[in-house]
Image (tube, rainbow, N blue to C red):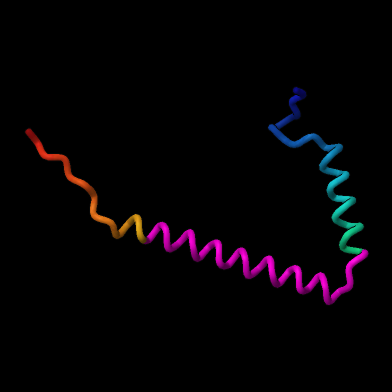
Amino acid sequence: MKTFPNNSRNPAPVEMGRRGGLARAKALSAKKRKEIAIKAAKAATEARGRKAKEKASKLSQPRAFQSEG
């Protein structure tokens, strides 16, 4: 396996992915791009909310104490 400086990704596939994304964006209408962006923003917000709830529930649970014996 080839290694790249600073543990970066192989630049060739990255460039191909970027080109594909730009081509897809160009093919979509402004309305459709907006719908996709709104859906992604809602998903990210929900994921942050779930993560915060999980963290809060872990903090609120009492810790188990080990008996000295």
Give coordinates of residue 34: x percent, y percent: 78, 73
Q: Quadrant of residue 40?
A: bottom right
The structure residue drawn at horizontal position 84% and vertical position 39%, both measured from the top left corner, is 13
Give coordinates of residue 20: x percent, y percent: 88, 52
Q: Residue furthest bottom?
A: 31
Q: Quadrant of residue 35?
A: bottom right
Q: Quadrant of the N terminus?
A: top right
Residue 50 belongs to the span the image colors magenta: yes
Name the foreground residue: 41 vs 5. 41
Relative side of 29 to 55, left or right: right
- From this view, report whether residue 63 is shown above or below residue 37: above
- From this view, report whether residue 26 is shown above or below residue 2: below
The structure residue drawn at horizontal position 88% and vertical position 57%, both measured from the top left corner, is 22
- From this view, report whether residue 51 is shown above or below residue 19: below
Marks counted in the figure total 0
Q: Main secondary structure of the magenta part?
A: helix
Give coordinates of residue 39: x percent, y percent: 69, 70
Relative side of 40 to 13, left or right: left
- From this view, report whether residue 3 is shown above or below residue 55: above
Q: Quadrant of residue 58?
A: bottom left
Q: Residue furthest top?
A: 1
The structure residue drawn at horizontal position 55% and vertical position 62%, both measured from the top left corner, is 47
Give coordinates of residue 59: x percent, y percent: 32, 57
Q: Which residues are magenta?
A: 27-56
Q: Quadrant of the C terminus?
A: top left
Relative side of 36 to 49, left or right: right
The structure residue drawn at horizontal position 56% and vertical position 67%, both measured from the top left corner, is 46
Residue 54 belongs to the span the image colors magenta: yes
Relative side of 26 to 49, left or right: right
Q: Residue furthest left?
A: 69
